[in-house]
Amino acid sequence: MSAYVNVNGVITDAAHAVIPVYDHGFLYGEGVYEVFRTYRGEPFLLDRHLARLRASAARIGLDVPFTDAEFERRSLDTMMAAGLGTPASPGEPYPEANEAYVRILLTRGVGEITYDPAACPFPSLVVIAKPLPPTPLPHYENGIKVVIVTDIIRNHPESVSPLIKSNNLLNNALGMQQAVRAGAQEAVFRNYRGELAECAQSNLFIVTGGTVKTPPLDAGLLAGITRAFTIEVAAGLAIPCEEAALTDAALFGADEAFFTSTTKELVPIVQVDDQMIGDGQVGSVTKRLLAEYRRRAHGRP
């Protein structure tokens, strides 16, 4: 199985998917996106992702002429073309290789080379469906290394709002490049106040004294769908969880740390830069949260 792409209703394999170079998503990065995954072939939290897509679009003045049902239909059609996501029968095992990664991109559309949005009469809608990239098992069992980005900071909220899940990901890419050079799996951004905000591809959590903490939205971060679901999972387990401003010292002094993302769920962090977190092992709170997260996602009793 390989990736298939739906460009404005036309589905092809990835090699033959095209979009005009005058599309403002390409010219200016004017667009928003969402990524969702499937569990047992069913889209997970799709309604939340679509609500955030609409909120992101509103923040850049981009009209959304598609209903949620249309977004879902195009996503499912593209998944089917890729041979992915056939729902499993209750109680039957489901092959992980059939789980889907789906990326929905909505751009300003095709128009002349101008910043005037009136030049683009209709937005472009692109859906990419491919097999869900597996996260290496050792990342969950042994944890991963992250680095704190030193060269750049997270976008200032009064410059480009981090609440916009924008197709323009240059800030994230530059931060992730530093992580790759350091042999790390993720990058942690500071905000303009010097506080920790979020990661290049995920949201950040720490555990201190049994309490789970994550930066508040006003620290300049995206309102992660998995972040919010994890907070709900913690509440269901009666694990204290709070939003709190986090500093470098709070992260280095934490008992545990992890990040959350749609495609990777909860991934334990055991090393930041050259320093181990806690005892350098995956913590018990992180393990409980991940197990309960998966139980709920799979719809198990």
Image: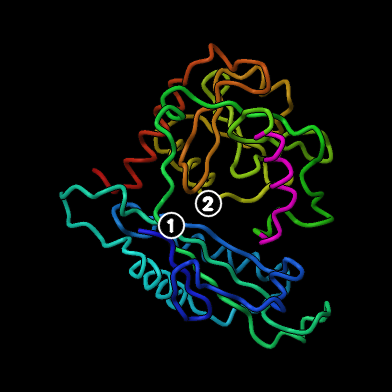
Does 164 sit above or below residue 291?
Answer: below
Please tell me the numbered disc located at residue 45: 1
Q: Which residues are magenta?
A: 166-180
Task: Tell me which secondary structure the magenta stretch mostly adopts.
Answer: helix
Marks 1 and 2 close (CB-CB < 8 Å): yes
Does 2 sit above or below residue 126?
Answer: above
Q: Is residue 28 left or right of residue 204?
A: right
Q: Is residue 138 left or right of residue 90?
A: right
Instruction: Return the x and y of residue 20 as percentages of the image width and height.
Output: 65, 79
Instruction: Return the x and y of residue 112 as percentages of the image width and height.
Output: 78, 84
Pick whichever, 207 or 263, lies toward us: 263
Is 176 part of what is drawn in magenta?
yes
Amino acid at circle 2: Ile
Instruction: Return the x and y of residue 217 as percentages of the image width and height.
Output: 68, 46
Cα separation, mark 1 vs mark 2, equals 8 Å
Mark found first going from the N terminus, 1 or 2 = 1
Tell me the residue at 72%/30% (across/down): 148
Q: Quadrant of residue 274?
A: top right
Please tell me the numbered disc located at residue 23: none
Question: Disc 1 on helix, strand or loop?
Answer: loop
Q: Quadrant of the N terminus?
A: bottom left
Tell me the residue at 43%/21% (across/down): 284
Q: Quadrant of residue 193?
A: top right
Q: Residue furthest front?
A: 15
Coloring applied to the structure: rainbow
Does 51 sit above or below residue 265?
Answer: below
Pick whichever, 197 or 100, lies toward us: 100
Please tell me the numbered disc located at residue 225: 2
Amino acid at circle 1: Leu
